[in-house]
Image: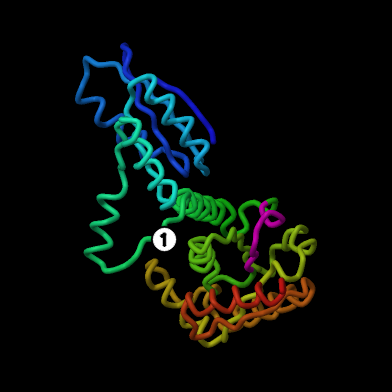
């Protein structure tokens, strides 16, 4: 059990916040309510990670001595029942902040709650991990900073227009930190690429006819002529040959992205990673 104290404004009233998780939700609610009583002082004592009856007994005793309210967010059924019964016996006001809404959900959707603490924290961690992965993908897109290759979960390599950036972002939403490096004959690949474990790097190849069409459409969307070297068939074959030679040096698995949606390619990449790690 972890205890912390804080005040909202000057005075002498105390509210005990009790939770089998962190207790942030209960504190937000208490703060919101307290603002409606601006002339009163409310001191908050938060008791986080309450996991046994002994903790509750100590809290109830202290709340009774100070004539305080207990506001709680407890989802472990045995602890909630004990707190309700003992608070009533000791004539301590205990307010359940979760059950009314949980009961409404249960009745409306005909489902049973998990009654597991700290699930919100898990959701928060998942959210922030996803944001960190997206920021990583943006920072290390298109070979901008080779130093990120070592810290990436996945490194994608391939010629221009093989969906490296869309794949990086899609995988980032799955919480993978992804960097990508374009392979161009005139530009030596970063030395860091050849220091990577082979199971971290994925090569992307594509049929030259399809790539030719994609590049012509790209030039057209930019208002440029499709006759320039970028979309020429000879140039594409040269780039693909160069890319394949680099991929062989790295020793990485290669995926043909021809006619594949980003989601399909991403699934293949994740499958490859899981096989390599198992």
Report the span colored magenta. Answer: 148-156
For the residue labelled by badge 1, is the local secondary structure a helix, a strand or a loop? Answer: loop
The residue at the point 31 percent across, 36 percent down is 88
| Furthest residue toward front | 89
**Residue 220 in picture, x, y percent from top left:** 39, 73
In the shown orientation, is residue 130 left or right of residue 251? left
User: Toward which corner of the image does residue 27 lie, by quadrant?
Assistant: top left
The residue identified by callout 1 is 114
**Residue 141 in picture, x, y percent from top left:** 56, 57
**Residue 235 in picture, x, y percent from top left:** 61, 78
**Residue 50 in picture, x, y percent from top left:** 50, 40
Q: Locate the C terminus and report the quarter of the image it occupies.
A: bottom right
Q: Locate the N terminus and report the quarter of the image it occupies.
A: top right
The residue at the point 54 percent across, 60 percent down is 175
Q: Please rate how many residues cluster around mark 1, counting C-alpha atoms within 10 Å: few if below 14, some from 14 to 19, many from 20.
A: few
Asked if 22 appears above or below 142 in the picture, the reply is: above
Depth order, front residue of 210/106: 106
User: Toward which corner of the image does residue 65 lie, by quadrant?
Assistant: top left
Depth order, front residue of 99/244: 99
Depth order, front residue of 146/217: 146
In the shown orientation, is residue 109 left or right of residue 227? left
Asked if 32 appears above or below 37 in the picture, the reply is: below
């Amino acid at each position: 059990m972890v205890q912390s104290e804080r005040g909202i404004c000057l005075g002498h009233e105390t509210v005990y916040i009790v939770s089998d998780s962190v207790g942030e939700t209960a504190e937000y609610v208490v703060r919101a309510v307290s603002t409606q009583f601006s002339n009163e002082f409310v001191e908050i004592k938060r008791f986080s990670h309450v996991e046994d009856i002994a903790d509750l007994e100590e809290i109830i005793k202290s709340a009774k001595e100070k004539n305080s309210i207990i506001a709680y967010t407890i989802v472990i059924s045995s602890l909630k029942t004990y707190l309700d019964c003992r608070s009533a016996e000791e004539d301590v006001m205990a307010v359940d902040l979760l059950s009314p809404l949980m009961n409404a959900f249960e009745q409306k959707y005909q489902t049973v709650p998990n009654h597991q603490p700290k699930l919100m924290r898990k959701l928060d961690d998942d959210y922030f991990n996803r944001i960190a992965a997206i920021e990583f993908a943006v920072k290390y897109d298109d070979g901008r900073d080779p130093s990120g290759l070592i810290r990436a979960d996945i490194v994608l390599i391939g010629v221009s227009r093989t969906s490296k950036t869309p794949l990086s972002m899609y995988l980032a939403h799955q919480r993978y930190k992804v960097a990508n490096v374009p392979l161009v004959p005139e530009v030596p690949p970063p030395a860091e690429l050849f220091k990577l474990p082979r199971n971290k790097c994925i090569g992307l190849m594509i049929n030259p006819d399809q790539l030719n069409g994609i590049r012509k459409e790209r030039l057209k969307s930019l208002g440029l002529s499709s006759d320039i070297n970028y979309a020429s068939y000879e140039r594409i074959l040269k780039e693909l040959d160069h890319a394949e030679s680099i991929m062989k040096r790295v020793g990485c698995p290669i995926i043909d992205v021809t006619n594949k949606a980003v989601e399909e390619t991403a699934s293949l990449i994740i499958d490859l990673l899981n096989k390599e790690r198992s």
